[in-house]
Image (cartoon, helix red, strand yellow):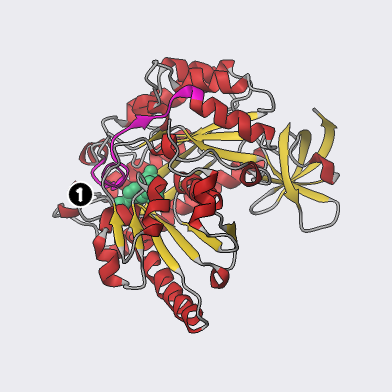
Amino acid sequence: MSHPVSPDAADAAGARGERVFVKSFGCQMNVYDSQRMTDLALTQGYSETADIAEADLVVFNTCHIRERAAEKLYSELGKAREVKQARAAEGKATKLVVAGCVAQAEGREILRRQSAVDIVVGPQNYHRLPALLRARGAVVDTDFAVEDKFEQLPPPTEAATRGRGVSAFVTVQEGCDKFCAFCVVPYTRGAEVSRPADKILAEIARLAEAGACEFTLIGQNVNAYRDEDGIGLAALLSRAADLPGVARLRYSTSHPNDMDEALIAAHAENPKLAPCLHLPVQSGSNRILRAMNRRHDVAAYLDIIARVRRARPDIAFSSDFIVGFPGETEADFEATLALVEAVGFAFAYAFKYSSRPGTPAADAPDQVAAAVIEARHARLFALLESQRQAFNRATVGRRFGVIFDKPGRHPGQLIGRSPYMQAVHAEAAAERIGLMSQVEIVDIRPNSLRGRLVEAS
Ligand code: 5AD
Ligand code: SF4
């Protein structure tokens, strides 16, 4: 295995004393990639800054999922251009990089819309950043790289790993072969690819040694994970659970069709697996599911929910919904509300349909009027919000393991996450940060729970 970036190359790159600013948009996959890009910059001699005005290298890791997400980039770039100009007036050079899914989808168009940009690099190519940084003039690198970026990237430096917090994301799978009619991901992230289990386990072990104890295995279709030796997600989770320092495991995001028996059984058998499942359904109407090319119907979805509940009765479900997909009628929308009532979600995201260029649904003739989408979204949101509050209320009096990760606003208070991802505030000593503590929930706030420390575990 050859790393393009050796420590010697870092010296040669001459970035010592220079600063890097990385801003992440969109999903957890991007948060993970942003961290890997930061690590890469550190090996090049940069140090991290949270102040864009101080940065010699600015990276925006972008999201293309909805129009608003993509447009946000251009307003950020406008601001970055001003910073770059102000720095130039002081004799300081700034390299401006656009990475991620907008880079992949729009490529050279980004340079046309914002000439201050120096580098456009896709999500499969960012391991080549050191070489791109040495290039003269503006460059675009969005070919799907033949080499595996994870093999090419340097392992995170120890300094970078330390202090990354108690909860870590680890990308185990990328890409999507499902081609839902609304979605850009198969085009921006490419085909489904799984990383080798031993590489993932080594990364988890390293992060655990550096203080992380909760791990979320992430992928666009994480439950389609299968490495070249045939190891699936359930086996990977089981091996991860055996690593020292691993207290809790999660995985996200899953497609209903990839919920196999082994993974459902893992919810019964793997004690470190959190009792949560994020399982996007998008719509409760069979007609719309068909038009979305989801390849499952409502009955199949409800059947999976029932089977997972049998395996793990205290499981909580979350989901994603799209309202106003082309052709959605009032009856289709009512069917979505009925599905929500039937399942009972701990929380869920309701998205307004956003037409994305290049996807099959973008050209559908029967687009739903914006005002109708707005009204349906408000109704769905209200229902999901009432379910979220009911779920939170039902945790009062329950005891469970909370992993504290930071001090709260009040002295003596810490904030952590429940197994169900709820924020929990409790009086506890700072030494408890990074440890699993038994907490009894005593009260709820609009966006968090209040707990009482019962005992350490
Ligand atoms: N419009 C609105 N929401 C979308 N999503 C994906 N594509 C679109 C789109 N074109 C939502 C889906 C997916 C989540 C990550 O984003 O609900 O599960
Ligand atoms: Fe956004 Fe999807 Fe790309 Fe993630 S994969 S950054 S959500 S477009």
Q: Is residue 77 above or below residue 156?
A: below
Task: Report crowding for label 1: few under 14, some 14 to 19, many 20 or more residues within 10 A (C-alpha).
Answer: many
The reply to whether residue 257 is in sight is yes
Residues rendered magenta in the picture:
180-198
Task: Find residue 301 and report its horizontal and vertical position in percent.
Answer: 37, 29
Q: Residue furthest bottom?
A: 89
Q: Nearer the viewer, residue 384 or 143?
A: 143
The reply to whether residue 65 is in sight is no
Task: Find residue 308 and report its horizontal and vertical position in percent.
Answer: 49, 22
The reply to whether the magenta stretch includes residue 197 is yes
Name which residue lies at 74% across and 39% down: 434
Name which residue lies at 25% across and 39% down: 179
- The residue under label 1 is 361
Q: Is residue 352 above or below residue 199?
A: below
In which quarter of the view is residue 248 placed?
Answer: top right
Task: Find residue 276 and report its horizontal and vertical position in percent.
Answer: 55, 32
Q: Nearer the viewer, residue 233 or 108?
A: 108
* Quadrant of the snapshot with the C terminus: top right
Name which residue lies at 26% across and 47% down: 143
179 sits to left or right of 227: left
- Looking at the rendered structure, the number of numbered marks drawn on it comes to 1
2 sits to left or right of 108: right
Secondary element at image label 1: helix
Task: Find residue 421 and report its horizontal and vertical position in percent.
Answer: 61, 41
Q: Nearer the viewer, residue 433 or 397?
A: 433
The reply to whether the magenta stretch includes residue 5 is no
In which quarter of the view is residue 162 placed?
Answer: top right
Name which residue lies at 83% across and 46% down: 430
Residue type pointed to by label 1? Ala
In which quarter of the view is residue 373 placed?
Answer: bottom left
Disc 1 CB within 8 Å of nearest ligand 1 atom: yes
* Quadrant of the snapshot with the N terminus: top left
